[in-house]
């Protein structure tokens, strides 16, 4: 990862993403890659007006497949914070179990992945008009290196103002897997194909 820009924390990369997409509207940055050195949950809790901490906690619990209350749903669920494209919970518990089993069984494995293709359908039925089939995050790759758990996220579309929701979830997921493997957390690499300022861009 020496060839890519490094950021100490999620706050630093968030500020950078907001700055480079500042023109807004249809302005797109293609194929952005950044490495976050401290991906701990504490360092990856970035509160904004759109995402106060309780909203971050709600969306992370939802995407982890953990329980949340109807009150939390009624309070925090809203289209401006992302809809079906940012709902990753389908099969998440089983996918996490698979990653843990993979890296416990074969620590040198390159198969520790969490794929997030569609909600329930297979790729043969892909429909670009269906937001549930065009998830923003496509895959998370987990691997052990230098005695630490590291991760790379492949993201089709990243709205800069929704980054804080994504990274809070990813950090929680990485922390959960690392604890199950009894290893410390290493760096996280965020690979974005399409980076926009907000949801005003067409067909995000």
Image (tube, rainbow, N blue to C red):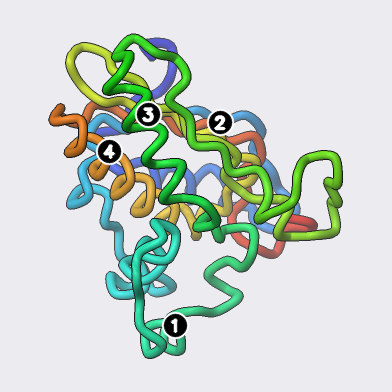
Q: Position of residue 77 (x, y in %)?
A: 49, 79
Question: In this rendering, is residue 155 above or below 23?
Answer: above
Find disc 4 in the rendering and name its residue: 177
Q: Which residue is mark 1?
A: 73
Q: Is residue 112 above or below residue 156?
A: above
Mark 3 or mark 4, which is nearer to you? Answer: 4
- Residue 80 left/right relative to 57: right
To which residue does mark 3 refer?
151
Which is more N-terminal, label 1 or label 4? 1
Of residue 157 and residue 142, the one placed in the foreground of this image is: 142
What residue is drawn where x is 57% and y is 53%?
Answer: 159
x 34%, y 53%: residue: 168
Label 2 residue SS? strand
Circle 2 residue? 32
Indicate the secondary structure of the residue bearing disc 4. Answer: helix
Mark before the other along the chain sequence, 1 or 3: 1
Nearer the N terminus, badge 2 or badge 1? 2
* Residues packed near mark 3 inside 10 Å, few (<14), some (14 to 19) or many (20 plus): many
Residue at 37% from the left image edge and 53% from the top image edge: 169
Dot 2 or dot 3, earlier in sequence: 2
Q: Residues within 10 Å of mark 1 (few under 14, many from 20)?
A: some
């Amino acid at each position: 990862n020496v060839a890519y820009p490094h950021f100490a924390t999620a706050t630093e990369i968030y500020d950078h993403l907001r700055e480079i997409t500042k023109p807004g509207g249809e302005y797109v940055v293609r194929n952005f890659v950044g490495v976050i050195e401290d991906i701990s949950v504490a360092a990856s809790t970035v509160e904004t007006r759109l995402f106060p901490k309780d909203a971050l906690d709600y969306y992370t619990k939802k995407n982890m497949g953990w329980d949340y209350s109807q009150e939390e749903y009624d309070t925090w669920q809203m289209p401006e914070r992302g809809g079906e494209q940012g709902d990753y919970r389908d099969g998440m518990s089983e996918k996490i179990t698979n990653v843990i089993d993979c890296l416990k069984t074969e620590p040198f494995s390159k198969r520790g992945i969490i794929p997030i293709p569609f909600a329930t359908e297979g790729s043969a039925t892909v429909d670009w008009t269906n937001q549930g089939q065009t998830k923003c995050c496509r895959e998370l790759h987990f691997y052990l290196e230098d005695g630490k758990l590291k991760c790379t996220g492949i993201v089709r579309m990243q709205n800069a103002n929704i980054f804080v929701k994504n990274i809070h979830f990813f950090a929680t997921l990485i922390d959960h897997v690392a604890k199950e493997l009894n290893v410390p957390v290493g760096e996280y690499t965020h690979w974005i194909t399409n980076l926009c300022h907000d949801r005003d861009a067409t067909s995000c």
